[in-house]
C-alpha cells in the first residue's frame, strides 16, 4: 500500500507539473506566433480526443504497472520516445501501410496482455510497445495541421501521451490487491474489445 500511495503522489505531482508547464509555455509560444501555440494544443489534444490512441496509451501504463519494475517506468518512456520518431516520419510524408490497423491492433494486444496477465520477457514487452508506438506517432505526425509548428505539435502530443501513461500506471497499481486485480483485468478486457471494434473498422 505504501508503494501505491507513493506512485499516486508521483502521479499528482506529474499532473501539477504538466499544468504548470502549460501555463509557462503558452504565453511564451503566444509571443512567438499563433501557429506555434495552435501546434502545441493540437498536438496535445490529438491523443486525448482520439479514443483509439487514448485506450492504447492508457493500456501501456496499466501493463507497465502490472509487469512491475523496471517495466513500470521503461514502457512509458520507450513509447513516447519511439512515437516521436514515428511522428517525424508522419510529418515528412513518408508513406506507411495500414497505420490505423496497427493502431487498433495495439489496443487488442495490450488489452489482452493485461486481461490474460501475460508476463513476457522485458525485451519482448519493450519491442511490442516500440513497434506500436511508431504507428501511433506516425498518425499524429501525418494529421498535423498544415499551419502548425512541427516542434510545438510534437511536444504537445508527447506530453499528452506521458499524462495518459501516468493515468494508466495509477490505475494499474490497483492490481496489488484482489479487488483491484479484478478491475485491472476487466479494464484490459474492455481495451481489447474496443480494439477489436477499431480493428474491424480499419479492415
Image (cartoon, rainbow, N blue to C red):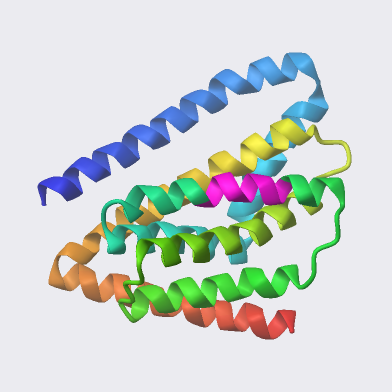
Residue 143 visible in the shown view: no
Q: Is residue 104 left or right of residue 163?
A: right
Q: Is residue 163 above or below residue 124?
A: above
Residue at (26% x, 44% y) in the render: 8
Closer to us: 73 or 193: 73
Residue 165 image offset from top left, x and y in percent: 44, 51
Residue 35: quadrant of the picture: top right
- What secondary structure prevails in the magenta region? helix
Q: Which quadrant would residue 145 be assigned to in this image?
A: top right
How many numbered marks appear? 0
Give the residues in magenta.
79-87
Q: Which residue is at the far left?
A: 2
- Would residue 189 be counted in the magenta stretch? no
| Residue 75 located left or right of residue 135 | left
Query: What residue is at 29 percent from the left and 38 percent from the top?
Result: 10
Residue 25 lies, in percent from the top left, at 60, 21
Quadrant (top left, top right, bottom left, bottom right) of the C terminus: bottom right
Give yes or no for residue 84 being in the magenta stretch.
yes
Amino acid at each position: 500500500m505504501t508503494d501505491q500511495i507513493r506512485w499516486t503522489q508521483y502521479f499528482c505531482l506529474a499532473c501539477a507539473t504538466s499544468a504548470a508547464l502549460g501555463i509557462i509555455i503558452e504565453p511564451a509560444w503566444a509571443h512567438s506566433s499563433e501557429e506555434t501555440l495552435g501546434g502545441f494544443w493540437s498536438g496535445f489534444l490529438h491523443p486525448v480526443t482520439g479514443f483509439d490512441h487514448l485506450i492504447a496509451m492508457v493500456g501501456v501504463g496499466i501493463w507497465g504497472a502490472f509487469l512491475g519494475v523496471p517495466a513500470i517506468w521503461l514502457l512509458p518512456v520507450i513509447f513516447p520516445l519511439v512515437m516521436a520518431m514515428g511522428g517525424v516520419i508522419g510529418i515528412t510524408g513518408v508513406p506507411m501501410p495500414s497505420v490505423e490497423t496497427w493502431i487498433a491492433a495495439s489496443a487488442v494486444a495490450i488489452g489482452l496482455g493485461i486481461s490474460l496477465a501475460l508476463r513476457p520477457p522485458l525485451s519482448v514487452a519493450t519491442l511490442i510497445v516500440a513497434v506500436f508506438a511508431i504507428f501511433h506517432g506516425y498518425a499524429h505526425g501525418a494529421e498535423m495541421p498544415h499551419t502548425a509548428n512541427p516542434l510545438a505539435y510534437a511536444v504537445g502530443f508527447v506530453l499528452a501521451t506521458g499524462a495518459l501513461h501516468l493515468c494508466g500506471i495509477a490505475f494499474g497499481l490497483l492490481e496489488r490487491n484482489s479487488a483491484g486485480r479484478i478491475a485491472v483485468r476487466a479494464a484490459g478486457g474492455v481495451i481489447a474489445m474496443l480494439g477489436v471494434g477499431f480493428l474491424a473498422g480499419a479492415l
